[in-house]
């Protein structure tokens, strides 16, 4: 944590290295530093940073564009959801996400930064059930509950980047994970221009248990 701005920072580390975390105590007072202990976990998303990966990610009324915008891990750059000119929803999704061990609590998260649109909506759904929440990337706050019973999270990583996540109880094994470049807190339809990036994204993650864990990059 950057104590002067209260922004979180991310660093790439090697295998078997201990991780150190600095967090503000619950009462909002001084910052405490210690070792980060987390349960063993797995990222259930495939190609967690490559949103053009064939057979893994599907686009809806949008394109994925490369970007020179640096992510919270400054060694890499982000991608952008670029809405087309259809008056509709504009999204990126992956399915199936197999939630091993359901029912239990799972968390879906991504790093996001505003482009031309101020909101991003995260959704996990299967037939007959949906968990969705919007996040305000302009003000760095939670937006609105759109569907389901869930717990939202947002954390400031500086330079306009926010870690956004939703925790929910998965009742079946197979879900679709979706990210919407949203114009408002209720994920209304709108028309883009097929050129301007609506939302910058990076580092998608689905894991068992509530709240954030360390990010695990995945390939196929």
Image: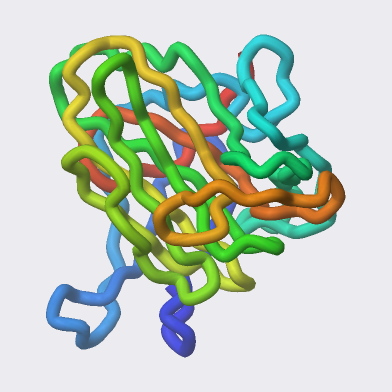
Residue 69 falls in which quadrant of the image?
bottom right
Q: Residue at x 56, y 32 (%)?
A: 217
Q: Position of residue 82 (x, y in %)?
A: 75, 45
Q: Is residue 79 visible?
A: no
Q: Seen in the image, is 154 located left or right of residue 40?
A: right
Give the quarter of the figure containing the C terminus.
top right
Give the quarter of the figure containing the N terminus.
bottom left
- The one of 144 and 30 positioned closer to us in this rendering: 144
Q: Seen in the image, is 130 located left or right of residue 14?
A: left
Judge whether 13 appears above or below 11 on screen: above
Judge whether 6 appears above or below 100 on screen: below
Specify the color scheme: rainbow
Residue 98 falls in which quadrant of the image?
top left
Judge whether 197 appears above or below 123 on screen: below
Q: Residue at x 76, y 37 (%)?
A: 64
Q: Position of residue 178 (x, y in %)?
A: 49, 32
- The one of 137 and 76 positioned closer to us in this rendering: 137
Q: Residue furthest front?
A: 87
Q: Residue at x 29, y 30 (%)?
A: 130
Q: Is residue 132 visible?
A: yes
Q: Seen in the image, is 220 located left or right of residue 173?
A: right
Q: Seen in the image, is 159 located left or right of residue 153?
A: right
Residue 205 falls in which quadrant of the image?
top left
Q: Residue at x 61, y 40 (%)?
A: 88
- The one of 107 and 58 positioned closer to us in this rendering: 58
Q: Position of residue 99 (x, y in %)?
A: 30, 16
Q: Position of residue 176 (x, y in %)?
A: 43, 21
Q: How many marks?
A: 0
């Amino acid at each position: 944590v950057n104590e002067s701005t209260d922004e979180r920072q991310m660093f790439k580390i090697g295998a078997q290295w201990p991780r150190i975390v600095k967090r503000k105590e619950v009462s909002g007072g001084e910052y405490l530093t210690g070792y980060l202990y987390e349960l063993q976990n797995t990222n259930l998303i495939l190609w967690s940073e490559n949103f053009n990966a064939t057979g893994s990610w599907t686009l809806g009324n949008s394109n994925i564009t490369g970007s020179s915008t640096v992510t919270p891990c400054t060694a890499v750059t982000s991608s952008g959801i670029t809405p087309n000119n259809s008056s509709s929803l504009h999204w990126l999704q992956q399915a199936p996400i197999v939630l091993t061990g359901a029912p239990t609590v799972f968390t879906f998260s991504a790093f996001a930064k505003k482009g031309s649109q101020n909101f991003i909506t995260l959704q996990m759904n299967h037939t007959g059930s949906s968990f969705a929440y919007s996040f305000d990337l302009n003000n760095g706050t939670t937006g609105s509950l759109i569907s389901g019973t869930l717990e939202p999270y947002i954390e400031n990583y500086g330079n306009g980047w926010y870690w956004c996540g939703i925790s929910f109880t998965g009742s079946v094994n197979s879900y679709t994970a979706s990210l919407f470049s949203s114009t408002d807190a209720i994920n209304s339809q709108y028309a883009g221009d097929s050129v301007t990036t609506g939302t910058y994204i990076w580092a998608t993650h689905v894991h068992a248990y509530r709240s954030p864990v360390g990010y695990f990059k995945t390939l196929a």
